[in-house]
Image (cartoon, rainbow, N blue to C red):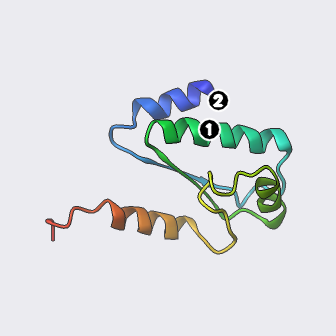
């Protein structure tokens, strides 16, 4: 995990969002949830937004049980990858450009 986060820090100058699609994960154990929480903390320290989307009910329950819902962008069943990307682009679009 440290190598991956390190690589993200190196490219941070051009990106400030890490988007994690959890749709294919039918379940998540406590250690995986805690690892995601640690990664979210490290990314936040570097000023990078971390958002998890499309998590199934069992995964959402685990993340909430570990107190990670807010760190991972208020995970819910309705927010899609496209929704997050649209919101991110709207927030980071230069209003002076047409």
On the image, the x and y values in percent for residue 27 come to: 84, 54
Residue at 74 percent of width and 57 percent of height = 24
Q: Name the residue under label 2.
A: 1
Q: Is residue 61 above or below residue 30?
A: below
Q: Which of marks 2 and 1 is nearer the N terminus?
A: 2
CA separation in Å, label 2 and label 1: 8 Å
Residue at 77 percent of width and 61 percent of height = 60
Q: Which of marks 2 and 1 is in front?
A: 1
Label 1: few (<14), some or many (≥20) within 10 Å?
A: some
- Camera-side residue of 5 and 40: 40
Label 2: few (<14), some or many (≥20) within 10 Å?
A: few
Quarter of the rendering containing residue 38:
top right
Circles 2 and 1: CB atoms closer than 8 Å? yes
SS for callout 1:
helix
- The quadrant of the rendering that contains the C terminus is bottom left
Residue at 32 percent of width and 59 percent of height = 92
Determine whether, in the image, residue 28 is placed left or right of residue 77.
right
């Amino acid at each position: 995990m440290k190598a991956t986060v390190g690589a993200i820090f190196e490219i941070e100058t051009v990106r400030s969002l890490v988007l994690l699609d959890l749709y294919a994960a039918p379940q998540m154990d406590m250690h995986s949830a805690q690892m995601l929480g640690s990664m979210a903390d490290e990314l936040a320290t570097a000023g990078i937004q971390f958002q998890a989307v499309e998590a199934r009910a069992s995964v959402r329950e685990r993340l909430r049980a570990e107190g990670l819902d807010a760190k991972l962008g208020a995970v819910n069943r309705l927010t899609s990858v496209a929704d997050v990307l649209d919101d991110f682009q709207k927030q980071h679009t230069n209003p002076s450009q047409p």
